[in-house]
Image (cartoon, rainbow, N blue to C red):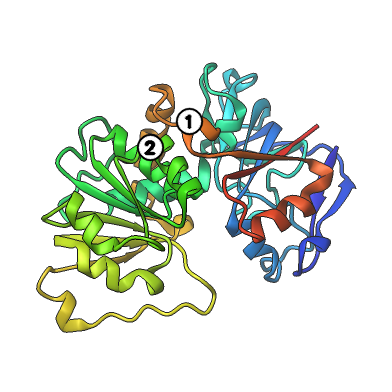
Amino acid sequence: MKCVVRTAAGGPEVLQLVERPVPEPGPGEVRVRVHISGVNPTDWRSRRRALPPGMDEQVPHQDGAGVIDAVGPQVDPARIGQRVWIWEAAWERPWGTAQQYTLVPDRHAVALPDHAPFELGAALGVPALTAHRALTVHDGGPGRIAPGSLRGATVLVAGGAGAVGNAAVQLARWAGARVVTTVSGPAKAALARAAGAHRTVDYRTQDAVAEILGFAPKGVDIVVEVAPGANAALDMAVAAQGAVVAYYSGGESERLSIPVLTSLPTNLRWQSVYVYTVPPAAKRQALTDIAAAVNAEALRVGEEAGLPLHRYALEHIADAHAALERGVVGKVLLDVP
């Protein structure tokens, strides 16, 4: 089979297309014939780091979609032929989705309904799981996303045109929240509106604090934050009583500095979200809720859903990584032959 591996840390040039035997699933595993591999910022960042201990090579990418074509012992044979989306394929494992066949634990392959395209399945994983955690981690929150679960809440999504931001907007709208997003220009504002944002704020040309408080006079309850260091002052200025700033990203050298006395009166909570180490119970709930959202057609991809798709052939994986590192807006996908 064709697969991409890396044997060292570095730039996109360390990704090599090679031939490997088709692997056989072990106990509790399924083998998925991958149709599309999803690429996330976490993939190029991990590519720049050393391989996990004990690995000589690794196939990159956590997310993907395809069809189960074999199962190992302890897995229901009825799963063979099932369309699935994959999450965390390469987390502390050698088998990512940048290959024709991959192995994952049974629960890491989630049923994908017939009406949902593989493009959507490959775009779930890291973005949707991160967005779900950010929307549910607040004190007194429902702990789950479902129709009505965020009714009455106001959500601020920083960077509403990004992959996580797009998933957060769609999930928050499905759950009944009022959603405002910050963007850096008209094109990204159009994408955030397509995803379902009620209001967009261009932080480069508008008074973001005034615009957000005009939309939510009592402040926002949940902030899904992509740049906590840069946006800390804004987040504190628009936070409602008992709000949470759930941050999931930031630059390598970014620092978060919080004036203690300013943030104390609102009981403001700063919550990091690292999708790979989210508590197991919360991860299980997220998988259930995301599957329900997909079934309800509440999660979509494509420019009409605010998430343009950028597709590359498997052998052009280096170009896909380079595009993502440059900050291309939308979702980068690899078509697996």
**Picture disc at residue 170:** 2
Viewer-closest of 140 and 44: 44
User: Residue at the location (70% across, 48% down)?
Assistant: 95
* Cα distance in 3D space between marks 1 and 2: 8 Å
Q: Can you see residue 90?
A: yes
Which residue type does callout 1 highlight? Arg
Residue 53 in the image: above or below residue 164: below
In this figure, which residue is indicated by the disc labeled 1? 300
Q: Contact (CB < 8 A) between labels 1 and 2?
A: yes
Which residue type does callout 2 highlight? Gln
**Residue 7 placed where, x, y %?**
81, 63
User: Residue at the location (77% across, 61% down)?
Assistant: 12
User: Residue at the location (40% across, 72% down)?
Assistant: 230
Q: Can you see residue 26?
A: no
User: Residue at the location (66% across, 60% down)?
Assistant: 326
Secondary element type, mark 1: loop
Task: Give the side of residue 335 with respect to residue 266, left or right.
Answer: right
